[in-house]
Amino acid sequence: MVVTDLFVGEIATELIKQLLEISRKSGLCKSNAKSLMAGIEELLPIIQEIKFSGVELPSNRQFHLDHLSRTLSEGLELSKKVLKSNRWNVYKSLQLVRKMEKIEKKIYMFINGPLQLHLLADVHHMRFETAERFDKLEWSAKKLEESIGNFKTGLGGGGGGWVEEAVKKLEEEEMNWEGSFGNNFYSGLGIEEGKRKVKEMVIEWENLNVVGICGIGGSGKTTLANEICRDDQVKCHFGNRILFLTVSQSPNVENLRAKICRFITGNDGIDGMGYDLVPKWNLQFEWGIGTPMLIVLDDVWSLPVLEQLIFKVAGCKTLVVSRFKFPNVCNATYDVELLRRDEAISLFCHSAFGKTSIPPAADSNLVKQIVDECKGLPLALKVIGALLRDQPEMYWVSAGQRLSRGEPICESHESKLLDRMAISTQFLSKNVRECFLDLGSFPEDKKIPLDVLINMWVEIHDVDPEEAFAILVELSNKNLLTLVKDARAGDMYSSYYEICIMQHDVLRDLAIHLSSCGDVNDRKRLLMPRREAQLPKEWERNADRPFDAQIVSIHTGEMKEMDWFRMDFPKAEVLILNFSANDFFLPPFIDDMPKLRALVMINYSPSNATIGNFSIFSSLANLRSLWLEKVSIGRLYESTVPLKNLRKISLILCKINKSLDESVIDLSQIFPSLSELTIDHCEDLIHLPPSICRIQTLKSLSITNCHNLEKLPPNLGNLKSLQILRLSACPTLKMLPPCVCDLVWLKFLDISHCINLKGLPEWIGKLSRLEKIDMRECSLMKLPYSAASLESLRKVICEEDVFWLWKELKKVNLDVQVAEKCYGVDWLDDD
């Protein structure tokens, strides 16, 4: 059905609403509005029937329907004019009455003319097709009668025959169809909301030909797809024309295509008894193309395979079930939601006790503890529940303790759960799989700043930032992580610190499990799965030998000098210090990391941590990336050894403590190669130190959410290499210094949410390479005359009152967008 068909019903509905309002407002038009409304109400059911029929209309009928659509649109526009008219303007009201009468006449002419002929044509086609189908049914019955003698012999002789085998297979599939829970137990556990959303995509969204169900391994995707196929409303909508096929990792594509083709054309009679047709006892022999039908492709792993199984036929809808998302094929995808706690308890109890609730004799707190560790994943609940069934109480206690430490209950648990889920990573390329395993380096249930990951991946996987970001998108599409981004993120000048990711705890456990194989000294990643008061004893027992880890991730509370022991890391390139403390002493073994390239320190305590042993930074000669979050910056002195290789510094939620003041340190001497500096949510930053402006290698300067920043240094224009300048959400900043116009390489200027900023510099037109300005929430009264000279400017994001100021410049190829309202500091809620 063409696009215009889909909008006729909506137009008619909106027209009725407008006419009701007209009836109340305009006295002279009241009778005509009610009369026209009555005609629309007669026509609306017919329009809806055509809309949801799934049949593509012939060109002549489409012409009539298009004409009706235009007439209804004219009526809608006319009703709006009536609403705006003055009821005491009699002359204008009479004009509107005449126009409404003309539209009413057009509608009734359609009802009494072309519509009647369409009905007669439909009756004629129905009689012809019915006779043809009965002829083919009679022929098929004769073929069936000829085959009746072979019922007992089968294809190879002997007992049973192919009919008996088919019936046996049907019975086996019926048992599988009911699922492992029996009596549709699982269908009541968190699946109803998913059913409602998928049914809406399958039945109501006529313009979506291919839709998807996506979720991690063991999340209940196939169960949900089965429930959709069994639903009475779905079966009624598709007239029981539902084909369920399992594709798998190594499919026979030609065989699957043949099954689908026979199903679509209606030639799926006796030869189709061995196929996964749902339900098999209602086979039909011939269906006209355009008849509604549903094809379910379960367990899809490959995009090339999927593309070969999609048939673009009128009325045919395809439901794709996969661990991965296929945005280029699926018009819409439903992400399977994990179980709530009460649902998880019911499922676990069914697996462990054969009941839907915790038995009186069981330890309620222990059961809930184990359920919570399963994180709402149906597969984990089923596997662990089955393993604990009929086990003694001490076994349950041990299981709870092992799960809380991120360890498997037993080898059976490990093989059945994690190995099942590990399939998701086996088909990743080497680099993508390594990046997935890196995610186990971060604490559970915490948002991971993407900038940290990008820096890690660039340094240790030999990829550039763009390729690293593409890896992130691939992992997201494969449902191995969840991307959480700022509304502004995603374009060319988005900062990675505006984006973060989340990972389900079970997937994190999988990454840790796959990274923890082999001897502790030989592992590529040395990780602490949970926060501990001290370093693992296993590390201490093996500290007499060097550790070969490339990534070292530590998660502790407060650490003093005596809490550390000496460890040798000759190959370590990334050190991640996750902690929650008010005081934290940097580990002395940083001295024994000669190849360290990225250092990440994230404090999850409510207050900033005071860092001890800050002078150890002098030994990090190869450090290229530094991320400090919620710490108090120690003093740097002139005697500090320059960090010549340091390229990126990110200070997030830190206390600066005047450590950057020019009276204390010359930053250009300490960081001679710095290219990116990010300072975010640092409340005690009042003045930007002038020595920053002497770092000639600086390409990106981001000072954001620093609410007490009053002014920028007057020599900012000395940053001749600067391409990106972000000053977002600095409400105390009142002006940009004129020297900003000397930033000859500047391409992006972000002054969004600087609510007290008075205006742009007068000579901003000198920025000949400036491509984008983000100035949302900046209510400027005027633009400098020189703004018209910004020859490279292609995009401006601003408020509505400023929108017209830019439009008045009449610049060619300038895209001016009114900003959408977006408020949120959800990423600050991790504590």
Image: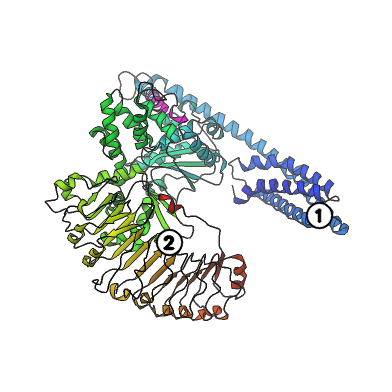
The answer to whether residue 215 of the structure is visible from this angle is yes
Residue 396, percent from left and from top: 29, 28
**Identity of the residue drawn at 34% across and 33% down:** 370
The answer to whether residue 629 of the structure is visible from this angle is no
Q: Which badge, 2 or 1, is on the more N-terminal residue?
A: 1
Tell me the magenta residue range.
169-189
Residue 229, percent from left and from top: 48, 33
Disc 1 is placed on an element classified as helix
Q: CA distance from mark 2 to mark 1?
A: 61 Å
Amino acid type at circle 2 is His
> Vertically, is 605 above or below 817?
above
Q: Main secondary structure of the magenta part?
A: helix
Residue 737, percent from left and from top: 48, 78
Q: Which residue has dot 1 on it?
A: 99
**Identity of the residue drawn at 74% across and 40% down:** 42
| Residue 681: numbered disc | 2
Disc 2 is placed on an element classified as loop
**Identity of the residue drawn at 55% across and 29% down:** 135
Decide if residue 196 is on the left or right side of residue 549. right
Structural crowding at the residue carrying mark 2, measured as other residues with C-alpha within 10 Å and reported as few (<14), some (14–19) or many (≥20)? many
Res 576 → quadrant:
bottom left
